[in-house]
Amino acid sequence: MQAASRESYAAARQRLDAYAAGAPADRIATTGDEIGLVADLLRREPRLRRALSDPARSGEDRSALLRNLLGDRIGADAKDLLDVLVSGRWSAPSELLEAAERLGVEALLASADRAGELGEVEDELFRFGQVVAANPELSNVLADPIAPVAQRAELTGSLLAGKARQITIKLVEVALSGFGGRSFSGGLTRLVELAADRRDRQVAYVTVAAPLTEEEERRLGATLTELYGREISVKQTVDPAVLGGMSVRIGSDLYDGTILRRLTDTRNALARR
């Protein structure tokens, strides 16, 4: 987002955090669902996106336009948050859509946080992403942009029923819708990172040939926390193809100490001689 859009989103996010601090978890979740419905509407209606981000209209006019359009289809809490959002200044209609999507997700995460389940939701999203990545047929089905989102959501709902929290299932549906213009797998990854960020943590994606023990994972997390000056949430992927050692990715930083990487580097060095 450009500066003006970032400021407008920050104002709505601040209002959300104040609201979530005093509301029960189920009420916050309902608000998140309703904001998500409005984001879906904005995705489908480019003319509405343009009207609600038009700098020639006053913020009050844009807010009134959305309220009149929605009527009683969403609750007062969602309307108040959307008022703050659409009355801000937006550099482009697409950035308003991005902000609405993000605000709905943050409300769902705030609901999980309020219920004391945010860490579990973060882990469930990551583990489901691993399950999908390990099954090419399932991955292709869920990533198919031609298949209706509702149909794919029914599939993920059946797969996760009784195995994941309701907020996790809702967030998986957000990823199916192409959260932030990303692929399904990319959307899941971003949601994991947003969940970690709400807990004031950064995600370390660790790839190993054999699973780390709990103590090894704890020590790695402590070392990375000291290095980055922020709590680190370790997400472990087991891939026998790396042969040994470990690869760690945090943001744009990659530390690849796997045996596979060393063999590849040696092979490339020999080929250049």
Image (spheres, rainbow, N blue to C red):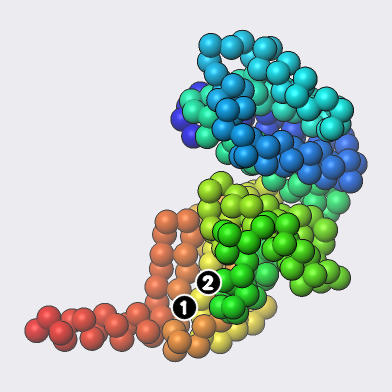
Give the quarter of the image for residue 44: top right
Which residue sits at x=64%, y=82%?
213
Q: Earlier in the sequence, mark 2 or mark 1?
A: 2
* Along the viewing direction, whichever of 76 and 2 lies nearer the viewer: 76
* Along the viewing direction, whichever of 41 and 29 lies nearer the viewer: 41
Residue 273 in the image: state x and y as whole percent: 9, 84
* Residue density around tag 2, few if under 14, some if 14–19, many if 20 or more, within 10 Å: many
Q: Which residue is mark 2?
A: 206
Q: Which residue is mark 1?
A: 246
For numbered disc 1, what is the local secondary structure? strand
For numbered disc 2, what is the local secondary structure? strand
Q: How many marks?
A: 2
* Furthest-left residue in this view: 273
Residue 81, above or below 59: below
Residue 266 in the image: state x and y as whole percent: 24, 84
Q: Is residue 87 visible?
A: yes
Q: Amino acid at mark 1?
A: Met
Direction from residue 235 to residue 111 in the image, left or right: right
Direction from residue 138 to residue 6 in the image, left or right: left
Which residue sits at x=72%, y=27%?
82
Report, in whole angstroms, how far the alpha carbon at label 2 lies from the one at label 1: 7 Å
Direction from residue 225 to residue 167 in the image, left or right: right
Q: Is residue 119 visible?
A: no
Direction from residue 114 to residue 228 in the image, left or right: left
Give the quarter of the image for residue 160: bottom right
Whether residues under marks 2 and 1 lie with C-beta atoms below 8 angstroms apart, the answer is: yes
Residue 132, above or below 152: below
* Disc on res. 6: none
Which residue sits at x=88%, y=41%?
27
Which residue sits at x=59%, y=52%?
178
